[in-house]
């Protein structure tokens, strides 16, 4: 059957699924959604309430609809699966793959005997050449179907696009297959909260499951909230208040990169921390300075501003603050291989960032 026969609002030319499909419009009670929520009034997935995003800046108001950090966990015995997605427009970047910015990645999750979870890639759902077809009558989107191992119930996690909005998401499975809740994140650890720049958001990973938060999440089976905003993380009062309202196990403060100059960091960084501390007196806070240290003459002054917040907190007796020198995030060798444009990490860069951050997270005693 055609998807438009089931959901007319997804009418597109030439997008035909295998017959006898059962469709689930996300959010659905059989699937667990993390990192984003669906706003029925606005008809899109969001990372924070749109009213809050609007109060921060026009840039954050726009990027709030990008589903960076969005994940769906479920279990199915299906032998194939389709993803149908609609959006306002398909974002095309010169330094990101189409999968990394606008696609979905599905990983199979397996709980091992020792309690850890292992992962393997099950499928990628990548926008095709038809994604912005004029014949779509203004309803942009795509449908991709892939085969799965199937046969028995298997656990999966589906990562949503890093640099694209998602208005509607429908998952399709053969009729007769079963779908239910998948594995759960650790109940003893609250989500890890990340605030920062385009790097925090996930630029420029080749896949939406590669940003450094995703590695940390898989290594520890912990949930996370990605509030990275490309060119939009400036430590405004409105975002400070919102961050302080969230319940998190650890707060990773990583917005050095978007500050227009070191002076901006001196004027906002400590204020952001103190606002967060008012409502979270004991939550571990990890400060990170920018990783693309080599090509920015202002990087040392920026690092000094970030470390100043840390040093003053330590002097005041705060025992739950940590500092990561951004110059250490890419390691000591082959640093030139860690970015796509001397700024944004590639997959190597994100893996190195994750390993360095993971070492610091372990010091907090939360994980």
Image (cartoon, rainbow, N blue to C red):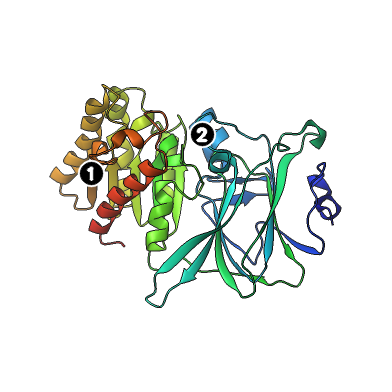
Give residue 148's quadrant in the image: bottom right
Q: Residue 84 at x, y = what percent?
A: 71, 50
Up the image or down, 217 lies above or below 12; here it is below
Q: Nearer the viewer, mark 2 or mark 1?
A: 1
**Callout 2: helix, strand or loop?**
helix
> On the image, which quarter does residue 51 sit in?
top right
Q: Quadrant of the N terminus?
A: bottom right
- The residue wearing badge 2 is 60
Picture layout, residue 319 above or below residue 301: below
Secondary structure state at the residue bearing disc 1: strand
The crowd level at tag 1 (other Cα within 10 Å; few <14, some 14-19, many 20+) is some
Residue at position x 49%, y 50% in the image: 209
C-alpha separation, residue under disc 2 versus residue under disc 1 = 26 Å
Quadrant of the frame with the C terminus: bottom left
Q: Badge 2, how many Cα within 10 Å: few under 14, some, many 20+?
A: many
Taking the spot 25% from the left edge, 62% from the top edge, the residue there is 365
Q: Residue 108's spot in the image, x, y percent?
A: 53, 64
- Residue receiving disc 1: 323
**Disc number at residue 147?**
none
Mark 2 or mark 1, earlier in chain: 2
Residue furthest to the left: 315
Q: Is residue 105 visible in the rendered structure shown here?
A: yes
Residue 65 shows in this picture: no
Tell me: 7 left or right of 161. Answer: right
Residue 85, image x, y percentages? 69, 47
Q: Nearer the viewer, residue 146 or 56?
A: 146
The total number of labels drawn is 2
Q: Quick check: 354 left or right of 87? A: left
Q: Position of residue 358 (x, y in %)?
A: 30, 54
Front residue of this view, candidates 90 and 207: 207
């Amino acid at each position: 059957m055609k998807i438009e026969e089931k959901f007319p609002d997804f009418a597109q030319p030439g997008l035909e699924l295998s017959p006898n499909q059962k469709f689930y419009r996300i959010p659905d009670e059989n699937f667990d959604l993390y990192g984003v929520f669906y706003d029925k009034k606005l008809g899109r997935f969001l990372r924070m309430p749109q009213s809050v995003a609007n109060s921060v800046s026009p840039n954050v108001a726009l990027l709030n609809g990008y589903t960076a950090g969005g994940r769906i966990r479920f279990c199915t015995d299906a032998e194939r699966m389709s993803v149908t997605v609609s959006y306002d427009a398909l974002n095309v970047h010169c330094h990101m793959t189409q999968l990394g910015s606008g696609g979905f990645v599905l990983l199979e999750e397996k709980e091992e005997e020792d309690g850890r979870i292992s992962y393997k890639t099950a499928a990628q759902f990548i926008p095709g050449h038809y994604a912005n077809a004029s014949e779509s009558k203004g309803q942009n989107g795509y449908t991709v179907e892939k085969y799965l191992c199937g046969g028995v119930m298997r656990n999966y996690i589906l990562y949503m696009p890093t640099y694209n909005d998602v208005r509607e998401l429908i998952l399709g499975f053969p009729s007769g297959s079963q779908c239910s809740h998948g594995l759960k994140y650790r109940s003893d650890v609250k989500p890890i909260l990340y605030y920062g720049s385009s790097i925090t958001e996930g630029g420029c990973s080749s896949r939406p499951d590669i940003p450094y938060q995703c590695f940390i999440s898989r290594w520890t089976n912990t949930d996370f909230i990605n509030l990275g905003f490309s060119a939009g993380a400036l430590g405004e009062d409105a975002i400070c208040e919102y961050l302080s309202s969230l319940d998190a196990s650890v707060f990773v403060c990583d917005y050095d990169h978007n500050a227009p100059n070191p002076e901006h960091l001196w004027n906002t960084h400590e204020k952001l921390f103190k606002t967060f501390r008012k409502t979270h007196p004991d939550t571990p806070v990890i400060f990170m300075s920018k990783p693309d240290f080599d090509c920015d003459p202002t990087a040392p002054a920026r690092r000094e501003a970030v470390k100043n917040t840390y040093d003053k907190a330590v002097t005041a007796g705060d025992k739950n603050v940590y500092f990561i020198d951004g110059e250490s995030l890419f390691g000591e060798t082959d640093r030139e291989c860690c970015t796509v444009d001397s700024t944004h990490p590639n997959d190597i860069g994100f893996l190195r960032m994750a390993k360095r951050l993971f070492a610091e997270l372990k010091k907090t005693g939360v994980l």
